[in-house]
């Protein structure tokens, strides 16, 4: 029987509800997804997927709501951060994501609503992938060519 590490066990037992603020739910989603990416046990994978899905289901209807007053201070800075969240996968990773989503759609196993979401995600990823592949890579300054 597979043993569950203390860290993973905490992921299965940490409480959250509709009262949990969106920043905590986002943290939970990150932890569940990270553990899922590293997990090999089928039962633990399903449990982590369930926890991730539950968090996402709680987050989704509130995404367009105003930020609650009590959270504004924690989301306010005096200087812009040096780094903003960006999606910057390597070209081979991005191609793999697109290929996997295409194969998932080809399998015909998705219900209509999730299929629509996957098609939209695939469209956006392929569009991003194509833009990435066709983006300028060198800058010409006079007779000098500089790699970007």
Image (spheres, rainbow, N blue to C red):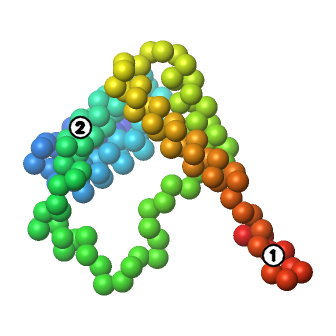
Residue 142 sits above or below residue 45 on the image: below
In-image side of 138 versus 51 (left or right): right
Report the front residue among 85 and 6.
85
Instruction: Inspect this view and state whether residue 139 appears.
Output: yes
Residue 34, horizontal then vertical, whole percent: 42, 44
The residue at 27%/40% (across/down) is 56
In-image side of 122 versus 10 (left or right): right
Q: Of helix, strand and loop, which one carries label 1? A: strand
In-image side of 17 versus 138 (left or right): left
- Residue placed farthest to the top in the image? 108
Q: Residues within 10 Å of mark 2 (few under 14, many from 20)?
A: few
Residue 100, horizontal then vertical, whole percent: 57, 30
The residue at 11%/68% (across/down) is 69
- Residue placed farthest to the right in the image? 143
Report the front residue among 106 and 70.
106
The image quadrant where one finds the C terminus is: bottom right
The residue at 57%/23% (across/down) is 103
Which sits earlier in the primary sequence, circle 1 or circle 2? Answer: 2
Residue 12 sits above or below residue 19 on the image: above
Residue 132 sits above or below residue 3 on the image: below
Instruction: Inspect this view and state whether residue 90 appears.
Output: no
Residue 143, horizontal then vertical, whole percent: 89, 81
Residue 125, horizontal then vertical, whole percent: 54, 43
Report the front residue among 51 and 58.
58
Q: Of helix, strand and loop, which one carries label 2? A: helix
Q: Are marks 1 and 2 in contact (CB under 8 Å)?
A: no
Q: Residues within 10 Å of mark 1 (few under 14, many from 20)?
A: few
Q: Which of the numbered marks, if any, corresponds to residue 78?
A: none
The residue at 17%/55% (across/down) is 65
| Residue marked by disc 2 | 57
The Cα atoms of the two marked residues, 1 and 2, are separated by: 49 Å
| Residue marked by disc 1 | 140
């Amino acid at each position: 029987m597979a043993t569950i590490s203390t860290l993973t066990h905490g992921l299965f037992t940490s409480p959250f509800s509709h009262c949990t603020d969106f920043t905590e739910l986002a943290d939970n989603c990150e932890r569940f997804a990270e553990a899922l990416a590293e997990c090999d046990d089928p039962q633990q994978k399903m449990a982590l997927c369930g926890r991730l899905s539950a968090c996402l289901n709680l987050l989704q209807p509130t995404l367009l709501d105003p930020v609650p007053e009590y959270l504004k201070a924690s989301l306010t800075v005096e200087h812009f951060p040096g780094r903003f969240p960006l999606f910057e996968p390597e070209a081979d990773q991005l191609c793999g994501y697109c290929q996997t989503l295409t194969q998932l759609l080809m399998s015909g196993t998705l219900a209509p609503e999730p299929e629509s979401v996957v098609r939209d995600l695939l469209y956006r990823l392929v569009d991003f992938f194509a833009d990435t592949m066709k983006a300028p890579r060198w800058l010409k300054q006079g007779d000098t060519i500089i790699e970007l």
